[in-house]
Amino acid sequence: MTSKQVTIKSSTGIHAKPAAIFVKTANKFPCDIIIEKENVKINGKSIMGIMMLSLTRGSQVLLSAQGDREEEAVEELSGLMESDFAANDLR
Amino acid sequence: MKIVRVSTLNREDSDLKLILLNSGATLERKITKKDINRPGLALGGFFDPFDWERVQLFGRGEWTFLEGLSEARQREILVQFFSYPVPLVVFTHEQKPGPLFLSLAADTPVFTTELTTHNFVLRYSRILDEKLAPSAIIHGVFVEVFGVGVLLEGKSGVGKSETALELVERGHRLVADDIVEIFCRENSTIIGQGIGPVLHHMEIRGLGIISIPDLFGSGSVRKSKIVDLILHLEDWDSTKDYDRIGLESVKKQLLEVELDYLEIPVRPGRNLPILIETAAKNYILKKMGRHSAAVFTRAIENAILSKEVNHDFQTGND
């Protein structure tokens, strides 16, 4: 299990489109991805789960991965969460 | 440990019909115990022990007693009473305490309610029971099939949502997709429901996010439901033994409550909705006292037994 504390930096928070990008990235990895916010744990491959957390700028979450390529997954996904999604390609 | 804030109880839609009497009070105090304290002993001057962490309920008796004391004695008792961080004080029967009480209460919230003491106790216990119940958020799809609460679990991409969609199309009801909040009532029943912003929406790969009540009507969804049966969907594993007879009943624990559990292997061409409908019907049959697999095996055993007897009889005749 690899975990990392992450603070959301995106100015618009993680609404539907950033959530979709996150989930798409998470699904590239075979390991289980867990996002925890204030004792609520959700599956990081679930778009509904991420939207349910209503992550806004400054929200702190614990990002964890367990299984194959877990370190790589935490690395890439935490980078994504700390990036400004708005600057990314939001198709 | 779960807590309830006083502000939650004071919401307009709350059944407790609370009216705050001292507007400057803090509503952020925490309630951690669902018990109620009628502070008769405390008002008599006995504070050791004093269950200050509970709601302090003043019925007609408590208030009449307190009012009957001299002002000096009232002051003495109440100063001690409010030296504890009491979460809230409630007066039933629309009683209202005097200014002395409110001024000594300082920032302790003091409420009055039109309810009788008995009714208040009943409603308060029910609400607190619900709010303080053990709960969890799990990944899965929760549907009601023929009145049976069926929780579908399994890895992402195994087809839970698509299966639920087909079930809704067949007239069953969706409770929650993907994110299910479960809580335990009275240590024996698990209730499942969807959560706030994403309620009754589904994410279907290739279609995106869809709203079930908009597409299928308000009868296609349900707010909450008791969980009766857990179905675990998984990709068919040819090395694994799946139950072929159904005599053994497997249980799975959810918040320490045992629930019926079935593993359903998924393979292209298997019609999952019909399997789930059948599992639900079979569950109902079992609850009605008819265990098909058991009845069937007994019939086979009897048939075999009678053949053996016949056979013995025939050989005996030879």
Image (spheres, rainbow, N blue to C red):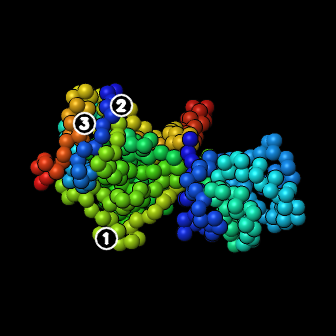
Chain label for disc 3? A
Q: Is residue B252 above or below residue B62?
A: above
> Which residue does the numbered mark 2 point to in the structure image?
B240
- On the image, the x and y values in percent for residue B45 come to 85, 49
Residue shown at 66%/64% (left/top)? B111
Which label belongs to residue A78?
A: 3
Real-space Cα distance between discs 3 and 1? 36 Å
Is residue B88 something one can see in this rendering? yes
Residue at horizontal 71 percent and vertical 47 percent from the top:
B83
> Whole-percent x and y of residue A2?
31, 27
Disc 1 target residue: B214
Query: Looking at the figure, which quarter contains the N terminus of chain A?
Result: top left
Percent position of residue A87, x then y: 13, 48
Chain letter belonging to callout 2: B
Per the rendering, the mark at residue B314 is none
Left or right: B48 as drawn, with respect to B142: right
Q: How crowded is mark 3: few (under 14 residues within 10 Å), some or many (20 or more)?
A: many
Q: What residue type is labelled 3?
A: Ser
